[in-house]
Image: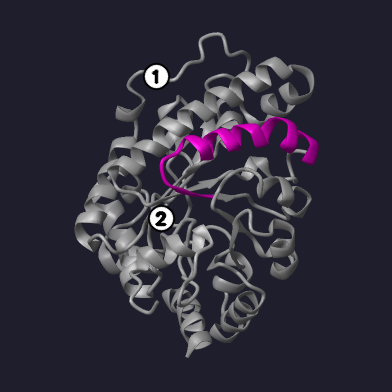
Amino acid sequence: MSDLTLKERLLNALEGKEVDKVPVCSVTQTGIVELMDEVGAPWPESHSDAELMAKLAIANHELSGLEAVRVPYCLTVLVEAMGCEINMGTKNRQPSVTGHPYPKSLDDAAIPEDLLQRGRIPAVLEAIKIIRDKVGPDVPIIGGMEGPITIASDLASVKSFMKWSIKKPDLFEQVLDLATEAAIIYANEMVKAGADVISVADPVASPDLMSPDSFKDFLMPRLQKFSGAVNSTTILHICGNVNPVLDYMADCGFEGLSVEEKIGSVKKAKEVIGTRTRLVGNISSPFTLLPGPADKIKTESRQALDDGIDVLAPGCGIAPMTPLENIKALVVARDDYYA
């Protein structure tokens, strides 16, 4: 078992197979300001430039010890290609959606024929190829993207999306289907470019925004369709306290579920999901990794490992101002656990 490559270890862990030790990586955003300065790949430039995007991503693997390389750094690449307006953010603030193509109706809504040539999609695909070239075959590459529910809400605007979910179920289902189709096309293209794992962040699917009944009836079928149609290992990340929908999430067909510290007990969560999927997380990005100190990071990591976490990881995207030494502490915590 001890001669597993990083890629074999991560894929085994996500598939519920035996591993020599729990992998430690981030399935969510990994860009931090300290590394942007270190390697000369700052935001917002590294969101659009494939070389810089690859350089910043590789830096977090090489300099912190995280056992995967993950790109890109936001949840706006696909929705931009689908017609959303984007504010590209700053050196320490991620891009965000500022305008929506279909807030009133879906009359002319369609997946653009040249979807994969639009916006930053070519840069992300190119970055994945550069990373593979640089890190070789044995380091896992995680392709990150916004999930179908978040895509749908960005296309319509959260306000219209919520309204349609109650008053116009036909439009609600139509925009969900459009979003799911686009997500599958993009995800499979990332796999073709060399991504080993597709990590989907779908914050709008959170019980904070959508009821558990809506999740079961409308969101789950789309997430199942996505996971079934994507030709790789997949991880679903939903923000917030997902306990009300955790049982449904486990039926969505993803190999891993990435969760925040807000779920409370990893042990209880593992009891809910059983052997249907694996648990990734759940060291708090804002409250533990960002402020530290290292001792707190190590204590929380040990707890998660004791409770049976399958992949030790930040609970959500790493905050850009997180010190590199705090990310290293996460890796050290895992190493110490097996020492």
Disc 2 versus disc 1: distance between alpha carbons? 30 Å
The residue singled out by tag 1 in the image is 112
Q: How crowded is mark 2: few (under 14 residues within 10 Å), some or many (20 or more)?
A: some
Looking at the rendering, the stretch of residues picked out in magenta corresponds to 212-235
Q: Is residue 299 magenta?
A: no
Quarter occupied by residue 243: bottom right
Looking at the picture, which amino acid does disc 2 mark? Lys
Q: Which residue is drawn at 59% across and 37% down?
A: 224
Callout 2–callout 1 Cβ contact below 8 Å: no
Q: Main secondary structure of the magenta part?
A: helix
Q: Which residue is drawn at 61% across and 67% down?
A: 284
Identify the residue at image location x=60%, y=81%.
302
Q: Residue 157 carries which label?
A: none
**Image quadrant assignment for residue 161:** top right
Q: Mark 2 points at which residue?
A: 91
Residue at 72% in and 70% down: 267
Helix, strand or loop under label 1? loop
Q: Does 109 appear above or below 38?
A: above
Q: Nearer the viewer, residue 99 or 245?
A: 245
What is the residue that sits farthest to the top in this orientation?
Answer: 107
**Residue 287 on image: x %, y %:** 63, 70
| 102 sits to left or right of 145 | right
Viewer-side residue, 36 vs 191: 191
Whole-percent x and y of residue 152? 58, 29
Q: What residue type is labelled 1?
A: Pro
- Left or right: 166 with respect to 46? right
Q: Looking at the picture, how far across and down is residue 24, in whole percent?
A: 47, 71
Tell us which disc is closer to us: 2 or 1: 1
Q: In this view, does 263 lie to the left or right of 58?
A: right
* Secondary structure under the numbered disc 2 in the rendered image: loop
Residue at the farthest left position: 133
